[in-house]
Image (tube, rainbow, N blue to C red):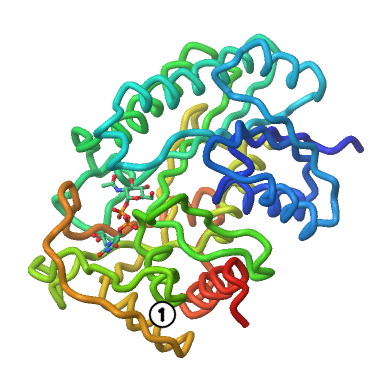
């Protein structure tokens, strides 16, 4: 039987590369597209090394319809997983147009190419940022979306709407948006992981770089939140678990098991962890010290969020399986690999 073929846009990125690995492991053919504007070819090489499969790579900007058309003509895709997007919250506030142009133009170009080439399944990389600070926790899929606090967050909301409307207009079209909570960790092989450019914005890369001596001290943004220890609470999801959620989402569409042709799911662990708890867990698991100090709250941050994951569990048969210890060990193994630390 011919294998299902999945196009992974942004497949050289952090979540894209881990998803490419899990797709190949699950028996899919995979083609990676990435413009390498915020990713390295080494991630594609990592995917090939881990899987032992020479996964095809095309350096293409998803806003470039002619180039995408050539890729769609070369391969016969059954499904698309669309990761390709800018993702830095702070940068999006400074360069809103770059974010709207890139994140929305690329999505619309991918959707138009899908319709033109008869490809009817898409998984979209959305974010828990669409919930803002929910009034009640955990956040379920019925928790109302709130006005975005950054252009980045707004692109995720608008993108969900574009996909929903496209699905409604085309009955044979299937779309699943996965609302990620906070993805962390790396592949257990330490051959792929997160590759932040410059000073990391996200917590775990900052922790691993501080432990490695690249950064002097982690600032814990706020200790006066209304949480048990005063630091902010998030739902940290292992990137391999997250990658597997994409595999089940693609399978659900291929097998036509969806309840509607546009669906969205929370992808988290269902547990909240504070910044200070995470730092302590990292130190304990890896036997290293993370210098840190309390700093003022970061503008735009919410106090606490974690996921209700029961819908994903019930409908997708997916739930997070990796322990926090495994995840934090993998994050440190990856940082050591990058720095050549033994
Ligand atoms: C942000 C985005 C989210 C995006 C995610 C991954 C918002 C509101 N959040 O999540 O949409 O998907 O990044 O890119 O748009 N922290 C520190 N010190 C640091 C860094 C972070 O204390 O040096 C704290 C933050 O204040 C926060 C927690 O760690 O409480 C997690 O921060 P971060 O990893 O940046 O993710 P979010 O802000 O939750």
- Where 203 sits versus 340, above or below? above
Residue at left 73%, top 30%?
A: 58
Mark count: 1
Between 263 and 277, the one nearer to me in the picture:
277
Secondary structure at numbered mark 1: helix
Is residue 33 left or right of 285 when viewed as pictured? Answer: right
Q: Which residue is mark 1?
A: 282
Q: Is 280 or 144 nearer to us in this picture?
A: 280
Quadrant of picture, ligand 1: bottom left
- For label 1, the crowd category at 10 Å Cα-Cα, with few meaning under 14, some 14 to 19 and many 20 or more, is many
Q: Position of residue 288 (x, y in %)?
A: 43, 87
Q: Which quadrant would residue 112 be assigned to in this image?
A: top right
- Residue 82 rendering spot, x and y as whole percentages: 56, 33
Compared with 298, 259 (above or below) is above
In-image side of 105 versus 290 (left or right): right
Considering the image in quadrants, where does the C terminus appear? bottom right
Picture coordinates of residue 167 (x, y %)? Answer: 49, 20
Residue at 45% over, 57% down: 183
- Compared across the picture, whether 282 is left or right of 339 comes to left
């Amino acid at each position: 039987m011919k294998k299902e073929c999945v196009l992974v846009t942004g497949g050289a990125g952090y979540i894209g590369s881990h998803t490419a690995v899990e797709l190949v492991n699950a028996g899919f053919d995979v083609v990676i597209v990435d413009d390498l504007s915020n990713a390295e070819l080494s991630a594609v090489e990592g995917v090939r090394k881990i899987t032992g499969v020479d996964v095809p790579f095309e350096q293409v900007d998803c806003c470039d319809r002619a180039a995408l058309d050539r890729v769609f003509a070369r391969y016969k895709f059954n499904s698309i997983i669309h990761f390709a997007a800018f993702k830095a919250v702070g940068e999006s506030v400074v360069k809103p147009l770059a974010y709207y142009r890139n994140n929305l133009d690329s999505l619309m170009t991918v959707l138009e190419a899908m319709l033109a080439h008869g490809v009817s399944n898409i998984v979209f990389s959305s974010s828990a940022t669409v919930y803002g600070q929910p009034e009640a926790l955990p956040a379920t899929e019925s928790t109302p979306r709130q006005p975005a606090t950054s252009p980045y967050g707004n692109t995720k909301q608008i993108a969900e709407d574009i996909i929903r409307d496209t699905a409604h207009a085309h009955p044979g079209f299937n779309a699943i948006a996965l609302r990620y909570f906070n993805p962390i960790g790396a592949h257990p092989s330490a051959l792929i992981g997160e590759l932040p450019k410059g000073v990391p914005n996200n917590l775990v890369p900052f922790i691993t770089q501080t432990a490695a001596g690249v950064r002097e001290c982690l600032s814990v943004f706020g200790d006066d939140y209304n949480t048990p220890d005063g630091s902010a609470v998030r739902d940290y999801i292992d990137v391999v678990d997250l990658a597997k959620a994409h595999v089940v989402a693609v399978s659900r569409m291929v097998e036509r098991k969806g309840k509607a042709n546009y669906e969205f799911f929370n992808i988290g662990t269902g547990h909240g962890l504070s910044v200070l708890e995470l730092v302590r867990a990292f130190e304990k698991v890896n036997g290293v010290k993370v210098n840190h100090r309390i700093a003022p709250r970061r503008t735009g941050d919410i106090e606490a969020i974690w996921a209700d994951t029961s819908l994903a569990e019930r409908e997708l048969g997916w739930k997070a399986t990796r322990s926090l210890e495994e995840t934090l060990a993998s994050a440190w193994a990856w940082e050591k690999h990058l720095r050549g630390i033994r």
